Amino acid sequence: MARKPKQTLAETTDKHLLYQASVQSPEFELDFIDTTFKLLRNRRAHSMREDFCGTALASCDWVRRHRDNTAVGVDLDAEVLEWGDLNNAARLSAGQRKRLALREEDVMSCGETGFDVIQAFNFSYWVFQSRKELLRYFKGVHRSLADDGVLFLDAFGGYAAHKTSIEKRKLDGFRYEWEQASYNPVTGEMQCYIHFAFPDRSRMDKAFSYCWRLYGAQEVRDILSDAGFSSTQMYLQCFDAETDEPTDDYECTDECEDHACWLGYIVAMK
């Protein structure tokens, strides 16, 4: 009897675990939300909606942070929501789980209001490729926030963002690859993929696929203003003066050197 071929790491590894390990930084991002909201509003934020939540890792961490914290995770993908429920939400205590709601819903049609914070990270809002669509989304967010609510977005840019490229990063037990496969300089449309490579030379190609419009930071801020937000702030990742390498610090500024790539947060106040 022929021996069954051994399965590769690519065949046996869960892509959602790889994504969480390589892309998401919920502790850092929620620290940023906590600190910035308190600085802006002189109180703590407790209710959060996580748009395009995926596995709802951030929402689960949010309800762990404080006994008064509540979170609603919204995503259209039923499969990834179910994964998040079974693998992330299931690890919460009974009390924490009661303060979390996962909803298979379009972020354009969320009706609940009164949120202290709404976050749309990992550039997910770039899925709206027309200004009209993005404005409609931001108007809906504005309605959903409390009177002193705050929207948190992330963004990236720099001249490297406008061309095809592959970024590779070694992590524990695998390699993460971010590919900007195509970019249309007329429309701003870009096609991106996440691939994973393993020590046994197996690969998980196109584990995640994104078709986005590369929006400029000021363009997004202008649309937020049109949607009714009273003001916006830009928090840019700092660079080491000697090595010119990015650090883990962010500063509130409207000035940025012409780096190949920059990362930042856009904070919009209702």
Image: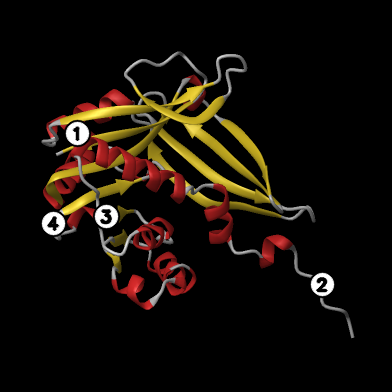
Q: Is residue 230 above or below residue 50?
A: above
Number of other residues with Cα within 10 Å of mark 2, as a class: few under 14, some 14 to 19, many 20 or more: few
Q: Secondary structure at mark 3?
A: strand
Determine whether, in the image, residue 188 is placed left or right of residue 69. right
Q: Label 2: which residue?
A: 5
Camera sees residue 125: no
Mark 1 and 4 residues: CB-CB less than 8 Å, in contact? Answer: no
Residue 184 screen position, x and y as percent = 42, 28
Residue farthest right in this picture = 1
Residue farthest bottom in this picture = 1
Q: Is residue 247 above or below residue 169?
A: above
| Mark nearer the viewer, 3 or 4 | 3
Q: Identity of the amino acid at label 4?
A: Thr
Q: Label 4: which residue?
A: 113
Q: Secondary structure at mark 2?
A: loop
Residue 182 screen position, x and y as percent = 50, 33
| Mark nearer the viewer, 1 or 4 | 4
Determine whether, in the image, residue 128 is placed left or right of residue 207. left
Q: Identity of the amino acid at label 3?
A: Met
Number of other residues with Cα within 10 Å of mark 3, as a class: few under 14, some 14 to 19, many 20 or more: many
Mark 3 and 2 residues: CB-CB less than 8 Å, in contact? Answer: no
Q: Label 3: which residue?
A: 48
Q: Identity of the amino acid at label 1?
A: Leu
Q: Is residue 250 above or below residue 63?
A: above
| Mark nearer the viewer, 3 or 2 | 3
Q: Which numbered disc covers residue 224?
A: 1
Q: Secondary structure at mark 1?
A: helix
Camera sees residue 121: yes
